[in-house]
Structure formats: C-alpha cells, structure tokens
Amino acid sequence: MNAPTTTSADGDRSDDNAGGSQDAGWFGRSPRQHQGEVPREAASRTPGRPVTPIRPVGSGTDRIRTAHEPLARTRAATHGGTRPQAQNPASERIPPRVQGPEPQRTRTRESEPTPASASAPAPEDMSDSALLRRTMAEIEPIADQVTSHFYSLLFLRHPDLRVLFPAAMDAQRDRLFRALLTAATHAEDAETLTTYLSHLGRGHRKYGTLPEHYPAVGECLIGALSGHAPQSWGPRTEAAWVAAYTTISQIMIDAAAEDELRAPAWWQAEVVAHEMRTPDVAVVTVRPDRPYPFLAGQYTALETPWWPRVWRHYSFASAPRTDGLLSFHVKAVPAGWVSNALVHRARPGDVIRLGAPIGSMTVDHGTDNGLLCLGGGTGIAPIKALVEDVARHGRRRSVEVFYGARRDHDLYDIETMLRMQRSHPWLSVRPVVDDGHDGALGDRLPEAVCEYGPWYTYDAYLSGPPGMIRRGVDTLVGIGVPTHRIRHDSIEELVGARN
C-alpha cells in the first residue's frame, strides 16, 4: 500500500512519515563565549570556523547521560535548598502597631496583602527542554520560512551535500528538518528518542548519509533557528540546541554503524509481476537480489529508476514467503512521482531499490487475544499480511477485519479477503463502503466498528489514511479498547508516543 497511514504520501511528503552542554560541540566556539544575544544577521553569514569532525566515543546511552549531566547540575543549583531566601525591605519598615481604635481606612488597608505576605512569582523555567519548546513555539507560525532558510544555508555552505537530495525539493524539503525539531523536543525522553532516532539513522543510510555530514546539518540548523527566533534565542538557548542536536546525531550515527554490520543500505529488486486491480491501483511483486528479512505488518521505502533519490513508503502485502517474493499495493495519486511510476510505468524486468523494513504494527504471538483490524483503501495490504501471519502460526485466534473504501469498486482486494475467510473459520471480513458520505475515506469505517463488539479484549490494528487512523483510535478508545492494545504506523508515531 502507500505510506502506512496515508494514500497520498507520495505527493507532498513521505512517512519516513539533552541537557545544556558546556562544550564547544560541533559548531566551533563554546556557547559560553557569547556575551549577549546572537545577532540575527549571523545566521546568514558563512562561518569562518572549521567544522569539527565527528568522533563518537562510547555508547549512545553514555552520551545521552553525559549530555544530561550539565542540565541536572543546573537544576540542582536552581531548585535545591541552598539558595538563601530574599529579604523583603518593606517588612523592616513597618511601624509598631498603634494602640486604640483605628480609622476604617487603616483597617481596610490591613486587610489587603502587604508586600511581605504577597507570594513571590514562580521562577521562569530555564531548563533545556523549556528553552527548546520556546524556540519551537516561536518558529511554528513561520515553519516554512525556517525550513527554506535551513536548506538554503546547507546548500550554500556545503554544496557537495546537494547531490544527496532529489532534484525537486518540494516533496522532501521539510523531512529532515522537521524530524530534527521533533526529536529535539523529546531530548529528555531517552527511550522514545533512542527508538525513533535509531530507526531514522538506519533509514538515512539509503540516502548515502555519512557521519561527516552531521556537523554541517547541525551548523545550518542552529543558523536557521537563531535567525528566526529572536525572542527566545540567546546563549543558553543555543547551548540547549547544540546539546540536543549532539545527542540526536550521535544516536543516529551509532544506529547506522551497527546496522552496517548486518544489512546493506538498500536492496536491488526486480519487478516480476505487475497486476492492475483498478485504473489507479496495481499490485507490484518484486524479487530482491538477496534475502530480505521482515515481519508481517511492516513497511519499507521504494525508489524507482525514473526518480532517483525520491523514496516513498509502502507496506508489505503478504507475510514472508518461502520464494522470497515481496508484494506491494500501490495507488497512483495526483502528482505522485513514485506511485504513478510504479502503477503506470513499471513492468516486469524493471529494477527498483528497497530500503530496510521498519514498523511496529506486528502481531504479538505470545497472547491469544483476538485481532480487530481496520484497513482503509490500500491500507488493506498490511492487514492481509497480518491475517496470513496468524494463519501460519496455526493458532485459532479470532480475527475481525473491517475493509473500508469510498465506493464498491474500490474494494479491489475483497475477493482475496473473502477467499481467506472461507479457508479460515476464525476470520471474519466485513466490507464498509462510504457511499452517501461527504467526508474523506474512512469516515464510515470507525462508525461501523461500533455496531459490533465488544472489543476491549482485542488487539486493534489500523492502516489507512491519517484521518481514518485518528478517528479510528478515538472510536476504539471511546468503546473501551485500552490504548496499549491499539497499534498503527503513523506519521505522528513519535509525537503521539507519550500522549
């Protein structure tokens, strides 16, 4: 299918979907040397200092701990009990109480809080995470400008890196930039950060990313942020971003280096079958040039020979096969370079490239819980793979599939699903058509789930457009399905991991 949560990810985007440091980091001088705010024009100046090469030392866990130690010391000094209480000069000037009756004016005044009794304002949060969040909030309304500035700096200062990016940047312009910013805001969540960035680091191998590229990216990231966040930027904010980016990049470098020991950066795969199911949906089957290990429910990135360096995500439409073949359901979307090439141009004998498999929407075979599966459009592809996976393990687990489409003829794989239902008595397949609804694909699908059930003992799996995923999750939670039993691969996977 197309990207795991959207049928249009081939258009405008792809779903590829720290504590304060006192070191100079990778950007030359130490933030301690700044005596005031960073001039806005500094972001557009070409630096006169060399970029320090990356020399990873120790494990990624060691570096995360080291990056957070300065922040821990700062917090201890700020919130510890060693700071003396501030004196209130006003309390020393209060005269002795006058005996006898007092005028009403005096009594009224005494009923009001005096400066001595007024609560002191809470100190401003100056932690690294707070500084990162302030920068993010300031640049959010002008994210497109910051993104453009970032890439302009990168290609101007480091023109040799331009070859790593596709010729047309509109579909990829904000991919790396937004990933870095998103990861920076999770710098204190080591578990989420490491998991997300490790996947990202391994995935960047297929682009030809090398360790020596990271300092250049970091330098230009800092330059773009400092030039567009004048209200929140300063020496401490710069130090926080340097520390966060150092942690981010070294986790990615470590993951890529580890992955290089056991897997190639990409696989060559020959198209061996191409079947048109509808005028804009094709089932493409390929044979990799070497063993390709993956799990049912995962997805990968594809690159065609017609659009070099443009990668798009597609889910595997079957569980691992004994013949080693891989199948994908591809829907051609407007202005979709990769999807239109795969649907309308690819033929048997053509060779494409595959990235490494990724994704966590896999079956837990250590439980007997039933499976509740919602597949919208080409989102039925990984659902079909999950059903095959359950069948191969030979355990009679109840599997309920809701297959959604906008119109009847868009249920392009319904015959396959019904044939599987006839072969497996534990499988139930219910087609859901959105005819008569004015909304997007999947509006009816979550509603249909509520008509059956109960589902609170099931593990839920969702695949389809982002809107369907969001509505589906809300519906399932609302009818009692625990959130830890709801699985999907979404473009908001990191952001929603702790929400």
Image (tube, helix red, strand yellow):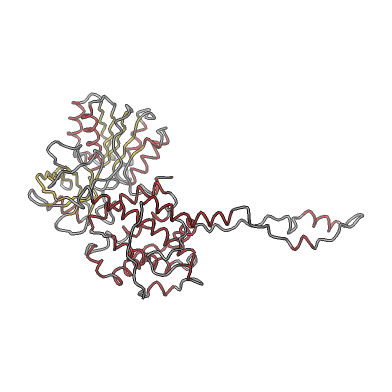
- Left or right: residue 275 versus residue 126 is left
Q: Count all numbered tags in the image, as a single digit.
A: 0
> x%, y% of residue 309?
21, 59
> x%, y% of residue 118?
71, 56
Asked whether 54 or 46 is in front, the reply is 54
Q: Looking at the figure, which quarter contains the N terminus?
A: top left
Q: Residue at x 64, y 57 (%)?
A: 83
Residue 179 visible in image: no
Residue 160 visible in image: yes
> x%, y% of residue 281?
18, 46
Q: Looking at the figure, which quarter contains the C terminus?
A: top left
Considering every residue shown, the one lying at the far left of the view is: 349
Asked whether 215 or 313 is in front, the reply is 215
Name which quarter of the figure residue 154 lies in: bottom left
Considering every residue shown, the one lying at the far right of the view is: 100
Q: Residue at x 22, y 26 (%)?
A: 394
> x%, y% of residue 422?
19, 26
